[in-house]
Amino acid sequence: MSENEPSWDFYRTFLSVLKEGSLSAAARGLGLTQPTVGRHIDALETAIGFQLFMRSPQGLVPTDAALDLKPHAEQLAFNAAALLRAATGQGNAVRGTVRISASEVIAIEVLPPMLAALNDRYPDLVIELSVSDLVEDLLRQEADIAVRMVAAEQDALITRRIGGIPLGLHAHRRYLDKHGIPEKLEDLLNHRTIGFDRESAFVRAIRKRVPLLDLMRPSFRADSNLAQLAAIRAGFGIGVCQLQLARRDTDIIRLCENEFELPLETFVVMHENLKTTPRCRVTFDALVEGLLAYLGK
């Protein structure tokens, strides 16, 4: 690194200030003092020749230069994290950090028992779980392994198809006791339903499969599958969730099962360069085995 080249620490500090909106909050998150955070930002501004933040009553407001710099700083963060995972996982022993990307419901409702069992077998393995419904880029090393609901398109990825996780319409017994049980899909027009607040490929797939859903106006909308699942469990109304999750609670009742079932195609994906890395190989295999068992295969 040249004498005038900014330290990686400055970019990490920059990202934290960008996220937190103040020097003090960024300092707490990074475990640094506020003056140190301020010095990092000053040094970075000096190096690039632009002001990154402006003070306002609401805190620090990023300039256009800061917003332009953000994706590059994020890429540095991804690369640094990938480098650390690779460095800590050298050798034949199963040790070091493996980063897994999965959707909200899968990450929170399905994977934890599998990951706990994996860690029991390999106590030196550190698991990072990225919880997001966005598809993280494995080629850019944003994650080592991903559980996805779409097939991988890149040739450099190893993909194992798990199968279709069945989705169905469900409601809590409390709701049905108050509002009655719909006997057919048309009856949903007279019920409180739970749906998405924005269009997506998944929503379009459901509507294509069940055109009647176009006529429904949900009483509860959320872009989070986990929030929708919570609303079903709270007795808010009728919504879509995985059959396996619904079976855990005898008060969650499946509805219109002869008219509505939608498979959610599921895949475990890993970059082919990681297939000989012990920590990634055993994690990939454990996820495949666990998800197949979850589907009863």
Image (cartoon, grey):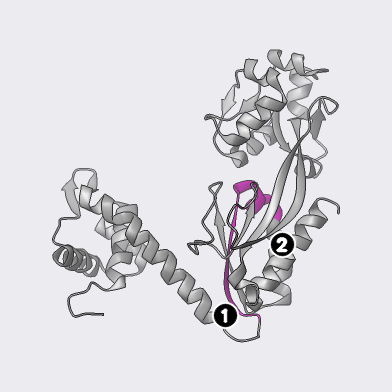
Q: Which amino acid type corresponds to the residue marked 1 in the rendered image?
A: Gly
- Choose the circle earlier in sequence order: 2 or 1: 1
Residue most toward the front? 155
Q: Quadrant of the N terminus?
A: bottom left
Residue 121: percent from left, percent from top: 73, 76
Residue 275: percent from left, percent from top: 65, 72
Horizontally, residue 244 falls left or right of residue 54, namely right
Residue 245: percent from left, percent from top: 75, 44
Which residue occupies 79% across, 53% down? 294
Which residue occupies 13% across, 61% down? 49
Residue at which label 1 appears: 89
- Whether residue 241 appears in magenta in the rendering, the answer is no
Mark 2, Cα crowd under 10 Å, few <14 / some 14-19 / many 20+, is many
Residue most toward the bottom? 91
Q: Which disc number belongs to residue 287?
A: 2
Question: Element at badge 2?
Answer: helix
Q: Which residues are magenta?
A: 94-110
Q: Is residue 5 above or below residue 77?
A: below
Mark 1, Cα crowd under 10 Å, few <14 / some 14-19 / many 20+, is many
Question: Element at badge 1?
Answer: loop
Residue 219: name its quadrant.
Answer: top right
Q: Which amino acid type corresponds to the residue marked 2 in the rendered image?
A: Leu
Residue 37: percent from left, percent from top: 24, 66
Residue 23: name its quadrant.
Answer: bottom left
Which residue occupies 65% across, 49% down? 151
